[in-house]
Image (spheres, rainbow, N blue to C red):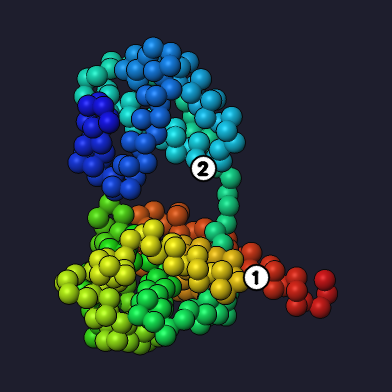
Amino acid sequence: MSILVRRFQAYLLSTRRRSILTADVYIREIEMLETFLLKYGKTPLDASGEDLLTYLVYRSQSGLQRTTMARIVASIHSFYRFCLNEKFRTDDPSIQIRTPRQDRNLPDVLAPESVEYVLDSIDISTPNGLRDRALFELIYSCGLRISEAAGLTFQQLYLEEKLLRVLGKRHKERLVPFGDEALYWLKKYLAEARPLLEKNGKSDFVFLNQEGRGISRKGIWKRFSQIRAKSGIKAKVHTFRHSFATHLLAGGADLRTVQELLGHTDIATTQIYTHIDEASLGMYHKEYFPRK
């Protein structure tokens, strides 16, 4: 990593307050830009707007989705704002580059019965299985992001009150309640499985892997892929978060409450779940209304 990119990383984390994951993505994109420009004897500090457009055309030719191209453009815009702030450049060559218009894709959502089927397909005869049941019950019950579940510590868990103090994006905290089903499996995991996973070492993370350390995001993805394959239901871990929000709205929860539970800064982000519910209503009407 070049000194310039290291400075950019520090800027993202300290000044812009970006998450480590977001900073890693932006850094990776700028390193790819550096590599591309090097072939033409240039660096990001002497690149022109035409150079950046050439790079974006090059990246788009590999068939990247609009969301990925938008992320690349956002990384470049952020980098050159940093260059201006730090007086590395007096101009912004990315100023004429527009973010690609995003297609409105509705998130995948499972019916409550499908969520239950996936959870019931988990083999709870092993410590790993009991952990998985408690983990995914909690993700669904609280609408957690994968990183939030992986990073959950005992200081954030209030069993008696059935509450989690969740540390979300940009270190924003929120209190989220969880239900009796999640409580049951969480207590069972803590009493019967976690002591076996913890082995000799002590860890403050609630969910542990086979080595007794906190389970990683990648570990959660891997476990869910195995569970999904066994259940035969098409879903991702994040589908549980989408389903949590949609089921709350379908049950009568107001949009502002769901926004708070999900940890969304902007309510417009939460509003997409109202469109999912409208789509479900249309489907049910088409299937069951007699005058089709």
Q: Which residue is drawn at 44% across and 32% down?
A: 73
Q: What residue type is labelled 1?
A: Leu
Q: Position of residue 120 (x, y in %)?
A: 51, 82
Q: Give the label, 1 or 2, closer to the camera.
A: 2
Q: Residues within 10 Å of mark 2 (few under 14, many from 20)?
A: some
Q: Where is residue 267 in the image (x, y as percent from the top left)?
A: 42, 57
Q: Is residue 173 above or below residue 93?
A: below
Residue 258 visible? The answer is no
Q: Which of marks 1 and 2 is nearer the N terminus?
A: 2
Q: What residue type is labelled 2?
A: Thr
> How many numbered marks are there?
2
Q: Which residue is drawn at 33% across and 61% down?
A: 216
Q: In this view, does 92 lie above or below 197?
A: above
Q: Position of residue 17 (x, y in %)?
A: 24, 44
For numbered disc 2, what is the local secondary structure? helix
Quarter of the image for residue 281 reads bottom right
For numbered disc 1, what is the local secondary structure? helix
Quarter of the image for residue 168 reads bottom left
Q: In which quarter of the image is the C terminus?
A: bottom right
Q: Which residue is drawn at 33% across and 36% down?
A: 27
Contact between marks 1 and 2 (CB within 8 A): the answer is no
Q: Where is residue 246 in the image (x, y as percent from the top left)?
A: 51, 69
Residue 67 numbered tag: 2
Q: In this view, does 204 lie to the left or right of 112?
A: left
Residue 290 visible? The answer is yes
Q: Is residue 20 above or below residue 220?
A: above
Q: Residue at x 56, y 62 (%)?
A: 108
Residue at which label 1 appears: 281
Q: Is residue 223 left or right of residue 282?
A: left
Give me the C-alpha separation between circle 1 and circle 2.
28 Å
Residue 269 numbered tag: none
